[in-house]
Image: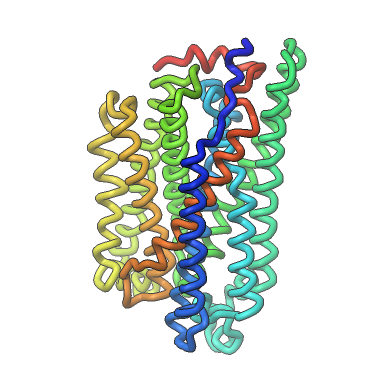
Amino acid sequence: MASIKEQFEVPSKMKTWSMALIVIGIITFILGLITKGMSGDEQEKATFIGTLMYNSIFWMLICNASMFFICATTLAMGGWHTVIKRIPEAISTLVPVFGIITLVIFIYVVLIDRTTSIYEWLDKDAVAKDHLLSGKSGFLNPAFFMIWSILAIGIWSILGHRMRKLSSEADERPMDLNAGKSYIWRNTVTAGLFIVWFALTVGSTVPWFWMMSLDAHWYSTMYSWYTFGSSFVSGMSLIALWLIYLKNKGYLGYANENHLHNIGIFIFAFSIFWTYLWFAQYMLIWYGNIPEETVYFKHRVQGAYKGIFFMNIIINFVCPLLILMKRSVKRNYTLMTFMAVLIIFGHWIDFYQMVMGSVRENDASLSWLDFGIASLFIGLMIRFTSSALAKKPLVSEYHPFLKESIAHHI
C-alpha cells in the first residue's frame, strides 16, 4: 500500500505564477490606497474599501465551503471523497489567512474610521433619528459586529484545523475495528460542531452583518442562503480545478472520472439551488412591490447594475444548466475546467454587485482595482493551497473508507 502515499511537489512555475499574482495584487493595493483610499472624496474611498471587502469575503467563504463539504460528507458517512479529500483540506487552510485580512478591513471600517459611506448604521446621529436603524441597533453596532465576526472566523479556523489534524492520523498507522470506529466518531463529532456553527454564521448571521447591512433599511430572509449557495458552488468549482490539475500532473492515481462526476453533480445541483433563491427572492419582492423592499433591486434592475445583474443568471444558471446536464460533460476535463472557471467568475461578479451595488449605486464599471485585488487573493490561494498539498501525502493510506472510495462508481 506504500505506493498510494503520493507526495505533491510544488512546480517552480506554480510558485512563480502565484508570486507574480501576489505582487500584482500588492501593487494594485498600494496604487488603490494612494489614488482612492486616501482620497478626500468619500465615494472614491468607499470604492476602495468596498473592493477589498467583497474580494476578501468572497474568497474566504469559498475556501470555507471546502471544509463545509468535508464535514457534510463526513456526517453523511460518505466515503467516496476519501481519495480526493486532501484537496478541500488544503483549500480550507486559507480560511484563517483570508479571515485575518477580512478582520483587518472590518476593524478599520467599523472601529477606526467608522466609514458611514459603507455602513450607515455607524452614524450615531442617523441611527437616533431613524426608527428602523434604531430598532436594529441592538445587533447592528460596532461591538456586536466585531465580536461576532471574530467568533465566526475564529471558530471556523479552529474546527477546520481540528478536522485536518484528525485527517493526518490516517497517515500514521493501520487501524483495527475499534480504532477505526473511534476515528470515524471523532471526525463525526467535530464535523457536527462545524456544521452547527456554519449554520449559525454562513447560513444566517454573517451575511446579514457583512453584506446585507450595507443596505441597513432592507432585509431578505433568503439573503444568507443565497450567499451560501453562491459561495458553495464556487467552492466546489475550485475543488474541481485542483482535482483536474493534479490528475493532469499524474497525481491522485486512485481518483477517477467518477469522483469528478460527483463534484460535477454538486456544481450542477447547487447552480440550480442558487437560481431558485435568486428567482424566489426577486420574484416575491417584485410581486409585492413594497418600496421598503424594492429599494434594493431598483438600481440593480433599472440602473447601472442592470447588465451585471441579469448577466448573473446567464453565467450562473443558463450555462451550467445547458452544459453540465449531460453525464459525459461532468467527466470531461476540458469542459469541467471551463465551467469551473466560468462559475467562479460568475459568482465573483455576483458578490461584486451585492457589495458594490450598495456602496456605489450609480457606477457599475469593473476596473483595474477589482481585477488587481482579485489577483492578490488568487495568488495567495494558489500559494497556500499548493504548500498545504505538499505537506501531506495526497491520499490517507489508512483511512477506514479508503477502499470504498477507490471502488466508487456511478
Residue 32 lies, with reference to residue 267, above or below; the image says below
Question: Vertically, is 155 above or below 162?
Answer: below
**Quarter of the rendering occupied by the C terminus:** top left
Q: Nearer the viewer, residue 174 or 73?
A: 174
Percent position of residue 164, x then y: 67, 35
Residue 155 image position (x, y, % from top left) = 69, 49
Q: In this view, does 308 lie to the left or right of 4?
A: left
Front residue of 297 and 265: 265
Side of 244 where 84 appears, left or right? right
Q: In which quarter of the image is residue 102?
A: bottom right
Residue 77 visible in the picture: no
Give the percent coordinates (x, y) of residue 214.
48, 71
What colouring method underlies this structural image?
Answer: rainbow
In this image, 177 relative to 39: left or right? right
Could you say which quadrant of the image residue 390 lies in? top right
Q: Residue at x 25, y 43 (%)?
A: 319
* Screen quadrant of the N terminus: top right
Numbered marks: total: 0
Q: Which of 8 and 184 is in front in this view?
A: 8
Q: Is residue 383 above or below residue 85?
A: below
Residue at (65% x, 73% y) in the render? 142
Q: Say which residue appears at 60% left-offset and 29% top-offset.
A: 74
Asked whether the viewer can see residue 364, the reply is: yes
Which residue is painted at 28% across and 62% down in the image? 308
Q: How far across and down, in percent of the image, does residue 44 sit?
A: 43, 80
